[in-house]
Image (cartoon, helix red, strand yellow):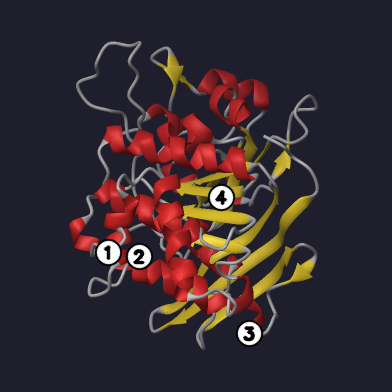
Amino acid sequence: MSVGPALLSVDDLRVGFATEGGRVQAVDGVSLELAAGEMLAIVGESGSGKSVTAQTLIGLTRSHNAEVKGSIRFRGEELVDAPERKLQEIRGSEIAMVFQDPMTSFNPIYRVGAQIVEAIRAHRDDVSRSEARAQVVELLDSVGIRDAARRIDDYPHEFSGGMRQRAMIAMGLALAPSVLIADEPTTALDVTIQAQILRLIEQLNRERGLATILITHDLGVVAEVADRVMVMYAGRVVEEGTLDEVFYDPQHPYTWGLLGSLTRLDRPRPKRLPQIGGAPPSLRSLPGGCSFRPRCPHEFGRCLELPPLTPRQPEAAGHCDRCWLDPEDKRGKREVDGRIGLEAPAP
């Protein structure tokens, strides 16, 4: 990891959508900084605001019913109010995104290579079709697709799930971006292919000095590759810190629940994995105070007031969380059956 000045800075990002059922506040006050060579993992359940945050960075949530507030600065240039033409220049060439499902991201009636060639030539007028095709062969080979010169003319359905995801990563890298956003890149892949894709992203991050955002709900994936971790719940960041801080000294009960749901090879196999009780709240009507309060067995009176995202331990200035519990008290409450976890809710 080579961390220097921030390439991407996000400050107090808020994204809301007007719907027939009322206003949905999908992202509420997210801030982050990302430097070259750094990998940031954004973790949380479905609906926590991870993907909306990422898509907003490149303007994909712009619509007549969306309201975006805050600041997104790339190399010091503001993107929130940037014209669409400017965002089109940045997408792919400077900030690239690998989407969750490559089967629906690729057009099924066009050959995989032709789609990547089109992406290159849309940004580079001076590159001929034959030159772009040669680049694509090199890209497919670099992401581990064997016999790339032949596979370039295959259709998406002729690739396996892992190969489609590799091809999607190749498309993301086609214009040598500075920032790569990988949105659930290992979803629906078996564990062997999942490990290969993670290793590939980690290798590319290291070799190319990419600033990488990895979006996932799986903390097992995060443990393999991330430098820093941001945990989101109901549109807000509830904890952030280095990988070691979040994994070995988690401060928010929601993070305890996520960690407690992971299988452990060094422990006896449980009859059933622990789970977080209840369900995430509707973003149209969040509970007052801490959004996790209705599902938290450690709720107390002060939880009716929204905690700020702030460091609560002098020795860890970059480790922030949104929980009113005292850090010493947390260390006792997060131990469940000899491991970090969330107590089962009272019946």
Q: Position of residue 22 (x, y in %)?
A: 44, 79
Q: Nearer the viewer, mark 1 or mark 4?
A: 1
Residue 157 image point, x, y percent = 19, 61
- Residue 192's image quarter? top left
Name the secondary structure under disc 4.
strand
Q: Which residue in the structure is indicated by mark 3?
A: 85
Q: Amino acid at mark 3?
A: Arg
Mark sitting earlier along the chain (1/4) = 1
**Do the residues under discs 2 and 1 have CB atoms within 8 angstroms?**
yes
Name the N-terminal-most of marks 4 and 3.
Answer: 3
Report whether 211 appears left or right of 120: right
Where is mark 1, residue-wise?
A: 153
Q: Earlier in the sequence, mark 3 or mark 2?
A: 3
The residue at 79%/43% (across/down) is: 4
- Could you tell me which secondary element the residue under label 3 belongs to? helix
How dense is the environment of label 2, judged by Cα within 10 Å: few (below 14), some, or many (20 and up)? many
Residue 193: x and y in percent read: 30, 38
In the rendered image, which residue does mark 2 sit on?
113
Which residue type does callout 2 highlight?
A: Gly
